[in-house]
Amino acid sequence: EIRLSLVGSEMCIRDSFRDEYTHEVLDEKEVRKAMDDELASFRKFKVYIKMLLSNLPPNAVVVPSRWVIHRKSPTRIKARGVAQQINTGAEMDVFAPTPTMVSCQVVLYVAALRGWQVRPGDVKTAFLHAEIPPEEGRVFMRPLPLTDDPAEYVWECFRAVYGFRQSPKWFNRYFRRVVGQVGFQSCVADPQLYHREVAPLALEDVKEEVKEEKSKQEVPNTQWVMGCLLYTSPSPRD
């Protein structure tokens, strides 16, 4: 038996594109470009391979997909291709972990007290850096609406596409491994607060593993990277 859900898959097939949150009517050319950029990221990270429906394994579940479109700035529209994996009764124990506000306040207080600088960092399409672990089994998704894939094809996914219920966990495991490779340790009180005792921190030491960038830039002690709070101290006692 092959179960194929169609819920929400035709979200974008309509007369106009609208912002997901403000419902503003968006320019079609801008939206199409944003979609092309997202699909380029899918190709870059080798997110999926195409597979005929007839070749799916028995009892395969194909997750619907959709576009989430939002104007992030007056000059930029973001089109995010997401899976629509809906909870079917399993325990609600998956979420995107973030540092607590107390951790943020404490580190910012220490930074202000010691004259550190705090700078933001971000990684584009962060979840797509994380692979789906082999023990999770095979994961299938309908092609995103308005792509050229015929109806008889599905995508077998190998990356943590936004919308899969386990994607936050897969990405968090990946992030923990990457920052561990450059010397960061997770705090006991707040697992999303990472610390290492070296100075100064090169933010690209972390990004090199994640973004494959070659250039490095020395930056001061306290950093935000991909929703996790990282900081360094010059020595164990300082």
Image (cartoon, rainbow, N blue to C red):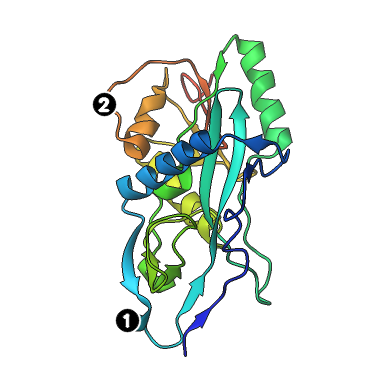
Please state the horizontal and vertical placement of residue 106, each as a whole percent of the image. 69, 27
Vertical comparison of 96 with 158: above or below:
above
Please state the horizontal and vertical placement of residue 12, each as a whole percent of the image. 58, 53
Task: Tell me the SS state at disc 1.
Answer: helix
Q: At 41% from the left edge and 52% from the top edge, which residue is drawn?
A: 130
Q: How crowded is the residue under tag 1: few (<14 C-alpha within 10 Å), some, or many (20+)? A: few
Camera-nearest residue between 30 and 156? 30
Task: Tell me the SS state at disc 2.
Answer: loop
Please state the horizontal and vertical placement of residue 209, each as a whole percent of the image. 33, 38
- Please give the residue where the numbered disc 2 appears in the rendered image: 214
Camera-nearest residue between 166 and 47? 47
Q: Quadrant of the C terminus?
A: top right
Residue with the most extreme top position? 115
Vertical comparison of 182 with 112: above or below:
below
- Please give the residue where the numbered disc 1 appears in the rendered image: 55
Q: CA distance from mark 2 to mark 1?
A: 41 Å
Q: Are marks 2 and 1 in contact (CB under 8 Å)?
A: no
Residue 78 image-quadrant placement:
top right
Residue 17 image-quadrant placement:
top right
Q: At 38% from the left edge and 32% from the top edge, which residue is drawn?
A: 207
Please state the horizontal and vertical placement of residue 143, each as a whole percent of the image. 44, 62
Q: How crowded is the residue under tag 2: few (<14 C-alpha within 10 Å), some, or many (20+)? A: few
Camera-nearest residue between 67 and 202? 67
Instruction: For marks 2 and 1, give the one nearer the viewer.
Output: 1
* Residue 194 makes an appearance in the image: no
Q: At 47% from the left edge and 41% from the top edge, which residue is drawn?
A: 32
Vertical comparison of 70 with 64: above or below:
above
Mark before the other along the chain sequence, 2 or 1: 1
